[in-house]
Amino acid sequence: MAFDFTKHTAVDQVGIEERVLRFNTRSIKNESKSKALKLALSMIDLTTLEGKDTDGKVKQMCQKAMHPFADMPDLPTVAAVCVYPNHVKTAKQALRGSNVKVASVATAFPSGNSLLSIKMEETKWAIDQGADEIDMVINRGAFFKGEYQKVHDEIASIQSLCNKVRLKVILETGELSSLDNVRKASEIAINAGADFIKTSTGKINVAANMAVTLVMLETIKDHFIKTKKMVGMKPAGGISSAKQAIQYLVMLNETLGPDWLSPHWFRFGASSLANDIILQLGKEKFGQYYSKDYISID
Amino acid sequence: MNWQYAPAKESTEQIKLQKRYQHFINGEWTKPNSKKYFSSINPATEEVLAEVALGNAKDVDLAMQSAANAYNKVWKKMPAKERAKYIFRIARMMQERARELALIETLDGGKPIRESRDFDVPMAANHFFYYAGWADKLAYAFPNKNPKPIGVAAQIIPWNFPLLMAAWKIAPALACGNTVVLKPAETTPLTALVLAQVIQDCDLPPGVVNIITGDGDVGAEMVKHPLANKVAFTGSTEVGKSIQRELAGTNKKLSLELGGKAAQIVFDDAPINQAVEGIVNGIFFNQGHVCCAGSRLFVQESCADEVIAKLKSRMQTLIVGDPLDKNTDIGAINSKAQLQKIKMYLQSGIDDGLEMFQCNTSLPSKGFYCQPTLFLGTAQSIRVVKEEIFGPVLCIQTFRTIEEVIEKANNIPYGLSAGVWTDKGAKIFNLTSKLRAGVVWANTYNKFDPASPFGGYKESGFGREGGLYGLMPYLEL
């Protein structure tokens, strides 16, 4: 069934922001807090996306992904590590034997300003290197020109290369300027075959926030009501504290429900979040905080 | 993964309720002439919280005398900017005691602590702040009118927002230079009495605010009393009508804020997900004990299935239970009598053959609780649609055209509020001018601000509370 891009689903920004404030009044304590913290840790895509990344840095991060904190060996691993395509092979080797997935950004990340053929070539390369997941960016230029079909077709082309690889589509919501646009871009991505929709590249100042994430969750829900197909969600960037992560989980729980409370359907794109979660889990367990010096910065 | 939120109960250790509360008359705690007391209970546990003085005509007379005395000897003569200082002081002291007030409001009335903490108490303090600002600017508010206070105001308030309603009544009355005798509702007198403590701590001149407790007879005595120059009543339409009858032919001023049966109108171009959220807020806020609750939902046929399905699924995520738990969305019904009334209406809906939907969550075994409820496929002629239920019960009807929905929305003796949900601004303005309701919210519901007037059309009452218009019922203009 072709997707009708002219159909407009209204989003009310004031209503969205109010709902977010309401989620943030939830008080999560004791065992429900520990459960949430562990779940959040298991949902992290530990990320390094810098020009100065080296194989050594990637290996160290993979170690942390598999063993977040040696003093608490019962912690879950994170969900995935997220790297540039040229580090996929290193990461894949370093993570051998674990369940941690390797996600690779592709399609001329972060701007997406390149030929479709080059984007496809890059995606193929990342998959050949062993990537389990591809994090692509949408063509924002085309989106703002109103060329929704083009945005859709590019995603579909990348999707056609993915087979068993899961495709995350980054909307770069910080550039989309309105929640109506976020809704529209989410609909396009989902209808083009995204397995996940993701807020941000982490490369511009405005990263994920709860309002944007709520609009995307509602789009996922509406799609699920229509088609019974689940789509995953990944807010990325700007989530650095355990408290924020729990607020996102409350929002997830009360919007999409318990089926989505799994690393298979929800991820946090973050680099420093893991350490704050470890600190908080330590507090829950021992009643006091570890010194930050006890926790690795990889 | 199933994730239940652990209990997050707000601690009540910090607050101390007295065993017994007296009337607050002439700045002093005064024993009731009847020597009798009644208990105020916690509707969530059915436990007695405190004993409260049972007033009678003699107590009313004493309070009225002290209010008249304070008016003539002190308050009327005081420069307006000095009056304002007292009102500011009350507002600040309420903020200082916000946590205590919120806890007692929840204990006494059954509303979720989240609401008393985030809505009732801050909004009540804001009303004092707002009207304090008006006290010395009345001449500018009503140019060339030489506004003057009326005298003694007899004020009777309901049990759904006990502290907030006390603030709505007392703040503008004081700002305009009147003195007050206020009676809180029988089931929820405690926060008004804590407010009396605040007022005492503020060194407000004795007799400017008097608070007496008791049943409806005390209210009737207040209305009748010759020293009352003005009567302000918030409560049921039935009582409102009897007060109006009583005052006919007297020279007492009257303002009434009575019942409602508000329409919420959802068009198919509305932001549906936010509309569903707004409908939930509109009817289930404060267990539906809200005179402006959006208890009649009109959904355009083309989006009715979607809205109803989403509404049902959203209702399943509402947390009903212990009002002191910070995660509770819907607390306890205010009293046994009110619960029985709601149950009577639920039965009436069933007897009329309506389809009923309720959440399948379990309710606490003790206390007065009611499941959030929908009645589907209703019509204007059915009792649950016509009468104010004052509980968490929403009646849903569908409509096709805008003319049809305007007619149906207005086809009720009440006219307090309404809500419209559409993405189209022109539709909003079209409806707001045609709906006979004191407040019309667009793409939101239950929004209040001290600067914004509130009040009804038709049998929902007259006179406005809040804003500049809220000064008028307390002034000779």
Image (cartoon, helix red, strand yellow):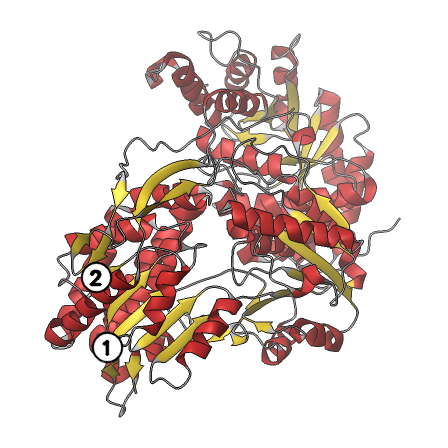
Q: CA distance from mark 1 to mark 2?
A: 21 Å
Q: Is residue B161 above or below residue B386?
A: above
Judging depth in this view, the residue of B185 and A243 nearest the camera is B185
Type of amino acid under label 2: Phe
Quadrant including the C terminus of chain B: bottom left
Q: Residue furthest bottom?
A: B144
Chain for numbered disc 1: B
Q: Position of residue B230 (x, y in %)?
A: 32, 76
User: Is label 1 on the same chain as label 2?
Assistant: yes
In-front residue for pair A19/A166: A19
Q: Is residue A84 left or right of residue B227?
A: right
**Observer-nearest residue: B242 or B448?**
B242
Depth check: give the residue in front, A97 or B134: B134
Residue B88 numbered mark, or none: 2
Which image quadrant: the N terminus of chain B?
top right
- Name which residue type carries label 1: Gly
Classify B35 as above or below B75: above
Q: Which residue is mark 1?
A: B151
Q: Residue at x 81, y 53 (%)?
A: B353
Q: Residue at x 61, y 30 (%)?
A: A267
Q: Is residue B255 left or right of residue B180?
A: right
Q: Is residue B211 above or below residue A74?
A: below
Residue A288: image quadrant is top left
Q: What is the x, y in percent for residue B451?
A: 37, 69
Image quadrant of residue B102? top left
Residue drawn at x 60%, y 36% as measured from the top left: A252
Say what secondary structure mark 1 lies in: loop
Q: Which tag, 1 or 2, sits closer to the chain's start?
A: 2
List x then y, in percent, for residue B81: 15, 72
